[in-house]
Amino acid sequence: MRIRFGRLLGITSLFVMLFILFSACEAPAPITAVAVVGDDFVMMQDNPTYTVVISPSSRQGAAVTWRIEAGTGSASISATGVMTPQSPGTVTVVAKAGDIEGTLEVEIVNPITGLILDGPEWIALDGQGTYTYAPTPADATYTAVEWAVLAGTGNATITQQGVVTPIAAGTVTVRLNIDGILATKVVAIIVPVTDVGIGGPAEVPLGGLGTYEKILTPEHADFMDVSWGVEAGTGAATITQEGVLSPVAAGTVTVTLDVDGVTATYPVEIIIPVASVTVTGPESVLPGTAPEYEATVLPEDAKYPAVTWSVVPGTGAATINQAGVLTPTASGMITVVATADGVQGTLEVEIEADDRMLGTPRPPHILATPENTKFIDGVWEKEGILEGLDVEFARQVYDVSFTTQASISPEGVVFKIDNSYDLSRMQYIAIKVTGETDNPAVNPTIGFRLRDFNSGVTLFWDQDTEVEVTEANQWIVFRISARYFLQDADRDLRIVLDPHFTASGNAGSLTIQQVAFFGDAEPVVEPQVLGPFQTAHWAQEPTASPATDEIDGVMVDVTHIEASLTAVSNWWGVPAYVRDDITRYTHITFKVRLLTEGLTANPRLLVTLGDTDLQNISIDRANTTDYTTVTVPIPANLRTEANMWAVRYVQVKVNSATAAAVEYYIYDLKLTGDADPTPIEATRTDLGGPNVPLTGNINYVENGTAVPVPANDDPAHILFSPNDNETLAKLEFGYSKTTGNAAARSGLNGVFVKIQGPAGITINIQQGWGDGWADESQRMFVLDGTVQEIYIMATPRSLVTTGTGWFPFQFNAFLPEEMTDVDIKIYEFAFTAILPEEEPVKQMVIPFSEFVMPVVDLESIVTDGTVVTVMENDPHNHVRAYAISRDLRYMNTLTLELQGEVGTSVTIKLAYGNMFNFDVDYVHTFTSDDVETIVIDITDRDALLASILSVSLFFDIGEHDEPVDFQIFDAYFSGVIPAE
């Protein structure tokens, strides 16, 4: 059977249509489940869309209704399932299809966008700080919160609750991290104030200001808030927040201070100050009177009306006591000053001159007039060891009493002339004196010197000026030489006056009343002293002048030294004066450049210290471009106590092997060496013993004859006869110091000369053709026709007592012109002992300066009045202090107040320079732990014949463990008269 395709297709379609029709006519399946599909975590700003899955799937197209069930949050949802969040929290999305509901719990979140960290700006080191935060927005939701602290200059820890605990002061950073959002805060960890005080004046005057300061405990505490205040009492005031008090009314007030809650108070008195002081009294007074002055202090109720009197010198001088009684001392203008509470009242007062130096013809061709006279005001002071002299201040004069032991010396009384006086035109100097003697027939004499102590130049020297003893005032006039030094701005001009009798056995007193310069000559402007070198007053050549030279590309000040042929042949020297303790230096150094070209031999520079030759330096004649450094050692025997002040200059002598003129540049001349060198041992022996004659051998005679003359009518002597028409004759005595005569010399310290010759001849006694062995005022003297006994003290004493070898002395006789037939008789010339007269003890105290530590190994030392030393066990450990006074020689007791530990000890040494002068060191052992007073009687008072002495304390801790504290409470010399 055949079936066609077309018919078959139609049949099939029919069956399908029937099937569908049949199926549609069946009942729909029921909905069994509704599932809500969408986001379960929604941001507030989102609008998520939700859908459903309906089971069975045949019902997927069923109608759905939407709603929201609020939980902790809220939202709305549209009919198409689009949700709009309203508040964060949880909500439930409900979808209903038929009778079946499906749900989905959704969390609505509000994310954090910002963070604010809050808490204290600072925390005390011993406290804690709690920190909180505020998110943005305020209702933000978040999950992870993380606290941390970052160390800066300080350190701390933090809990996850935000509690900070400090570890170290400084700054830290507190950090908070919430869901990746960061916040930080810098926090100061401070040292808190535990106590506070107030510093400032206890009294403030009305009209003034008082400034106060806070005193914190601990000293470097940190603080934030400071508040100053003032509470009225009987007075009133205001105060700024800077602590400046302004008085309002007199009386008492209380200053208050609050620092971070810690308070302090400070009582202050507002006082009535002195407003004015008026001085009344005579405005013109005479010498020798005692005028009284009064002071009126206003207002009358001032707190401090007490008056202190003083005098400001002008052209005149005076003193005034605290009762207002004036004592005139020099004519001219002064100012009387009364001071009360810091306020001064003044009154100009004229002290009238009691006379004028008119007439007085010495020399006769010039008279002093009021127009050309300058009266000089000043103070006469003791100088050196005054043998047989006692100086006391009396009225406006100085009374100088002297005994038969008063000898010619370089010392006496000194008058310092102030540099404010213009003396450039002056030609003469005069002193006014009167006096009295035990024997009126014998007049005293005066050794008078006018000297510039800065340059060492003597402007006038006269050993024997006779003073006529009268009750009337007498002016003695001297002509001034080397007048350039009158105008030197750096001058140190002084008169040294030595009153004495010469072999007369007399005694008496002089009254020195006034000093005056007069004259009217053109100033001497040609400098004699320039640069670091100084041309001595005896030298016309060489010249020393300032110059500059280029050294290493820099212009440097140098000294130009020019020695002529004459200067070379006579070995003139150019000195530079030493103004320091020579014992502290070991070398002389300078730099020199030769300027003279074409010399045929090397020139030389002879370096001397004082009059002692040190080294003759050869200068390379081929080198005229470079500087050569010269270093000359100072022998130990010149760095001794005796030479400390005697060696006053370094001298450079220029010379050439070919006797040619030479020129140099010299600069950087200085003394160098150890500032605390090893002490040079010095031994001292007592003075005394018979003279040791020096006249045994006549070694040399120049311009004259010398013969021994046996005793006849005269005692035996050397007859020294200079040739006629000679101005200088010389005689040399040869003497050998040997070990055999050392014992005889051991107690001697100078030279004795017994001599007679025509008046007017000047004798200068040299040793080895040098002058440095003794002071000029002793080794140079003028013959007066009588038998004279001259004592010359050696400087230093070791020249006499130590050493062996040839030791010549030269007598140089300077004769006035046209003097003939001269015979000089030398009766005795010998080493001798010049014994000082024991000086009285004065009731006074000379304290030591602060202690210093010249030796290391001191752990600490305080010099604010009480010295505390922590010592290691080293025998060289010591501290040192100095006493400086011209009155040291009057002392006889050394007192110290020390504190150590039982069993420790201290060795006490007294020293002059670096030489310890106690023959036996004084050792004190501490017997307690308390302050102990040590009193040492100084029986050998020769050790005190100085103007500066040091005491050194060498501590020994014994068996004690290191370290040991020693305390020095006081140290002083005193003059305590021993009990009979």
Image (cartoon, rainbow, N blue to C red):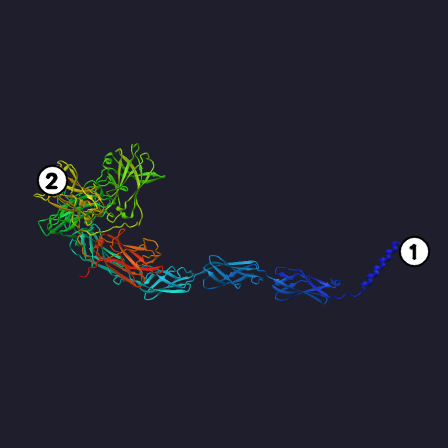
Where is residue 551? Give x, y as percent: 35, 39
Residues at marks 2 and 1, CA–CA distance in whole angstroms: 203 Å
Which comes before the other along the chain, label 2 or label 1? Answer: 1
How many residues crowd around disc 1 within 10 Å: few (fewer than 14), some, or many (20 or more)?
few
Decide: is 375 above or below 225: above
Between marks 2 and 1 in the image, the one whose residue lies nearer the viewer = 2
Where is residue 299? Give x, y as percent: 26, 61
Residue for badge 1: 1
Work out which quarter of the rendered image holds the C terminus and state it. bottom left
* Dot 2: element: loop
Work out which quarter of the rendered image holds the N terminus and state it. bottom right
Which amino acid does the dot numbered 1 rest on? Met
Front residue of 523 and 204: 523
Front residue of 802 and 443: 802
Cβ atoms under marks 2 and 1 closer than 8 Å: no
Decide: is 191 above or below 365: below
For this view, does 502 lie left or right of residue 892? left
How many residues crowd around disc 2 within 10 Å: few (fewer than 14), some, or many (20 or more)?
some
The quarter of the picture where residue 245 lies is bottom left
Residue at the front extreme? 740
Where is residue 722? Give x, y as percent: 13, 38
Where is residue 128? Give x, y as percent: 48, 64
* Dot 1: element: loop
Which amino acid does the dot numbered 2 rest on? Asp
Residue at the left extreme? 713
Camera sees residue 750 = yes
Front residue of 748 and 420: 748
Residue for badge 2: 823
The quarter of the picture where residue 369 lies is top left
Residue at the bottom extreme? 99
Front residue of 470 and 111: 470
Decide: is 146 above or below 701: below
